Image (cartoon, rainbow, N blue to C red):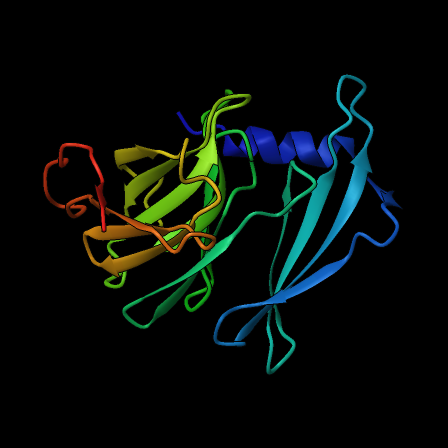
Amino acid sequence: MNHIEEIRKEIATYLDLNSKIKESETTVFSPTKKYRIETAEYNQTRPDTNWEVTKVEIFEHATGEKLFSIFSNWGTFFHGWATKGNVDYLICAEDIYGGQTIIDLTNRIIEGFSPGEDGFIGTDYYISPNAEILGVVGCYWACPYVLKFYKFDSPIQLPLIEFYEIELKESLSDKISWRDNDTIIFKNETSGQERVEKIGTAHNNIFAPGGVDV
């Protein structure tokens, strides 16, 4: 069941737009500079929490047109970018506790999902070269970080389907990149050592876990 409308209503109920946190504004651009995100953090009035809420406004940078305005129930706006075919996507979460929000920037479509309970908190996003797999680094509350992989063949059909996971106990600080469409690389920037992990594709069965040092 999708609880995203409940989350949106809850944020709106407790949001205090007169309590913007000083110097919390940020501006970031998409890799192509086509889109611009402006964020600001706000306090909320819910009595049993001290978490901030982030207001997120997405613009087409060249024209200044505002495409979307959303809120996330966390003080940091974790997000990623992807292009699949000729469509640009913003990947994020209105509900940080297991939620998924995908914004089709090209066709002006937004889809959100919330499980309505504590779930996986995504912080970093890695789209495969063919844009068929989305890797997400994150954790469950107070648990170790992992790298999860999701099918990205139908981006706005949520929730995305998870099909593989890698523990990051020894690779949390490594630089992560794709070698090809089914190989992920962890590179220790201090030692230069690389670890390679085959993950298969979003349309195949799960590979047995296990990395190879090179």
Q: Nearest the camera: 117 or 208?
A: 208
> Residue 52 sits in which quadrant?
top right
Q: Nearest the camera: 152 or 106?
A: 152
Asked if one can make out residue 155 in the rendered structure from this viewpoint, the answer is no
The quadrant of the rendering that contains the N terminus is top left
Residue positioned 77% across, 57% down in the render: 25
Residue positioned 88% across, 50% down in the render: 22
> Residue 42 sits in which quadrant?
top right
Rendered view: 96 above or below 135: above
Residue positioned 42% across, 52% down in the render: 191
> Residue 165 sits in which quadrant?
top left
Asked if one can make out residue 54 in the rendered structure from this viewpoint, the answer is yes
Q: Nearest the camera: 81 or 182?
A: 182
Name the side, left or right, on which 56 lies relative to 6: right
Q: Position of residue 102 (x, y in %)?
A: 44, 50
Residue positioned 64% across, 32% down in the render: 9
Rendered view: 96 above or below 125: above
Picture mark count:
0
Most distant residue in the bottom direction: 62
Name the side, left or right, on which 25 lies relative to 210: right
Rendered view: 36 above or below 17: below
Most distant residue in the left direction: 204
Q: Nearest the camera: 49 or 1?
A: 49
Name the side, left or right, on which 174 lies relative to 207: right
Q: Position of residue 95 (x, y in %)?
A: 55, 35
Name the side, left or right, on which 170 lies relative to 30: left
Q: Position of residue 64 (x, y in %)?
A: 65, 77
Q: Position of residue 157 (x, y in %)?
A: 32, 45
Most distant residue in the top direction: 48
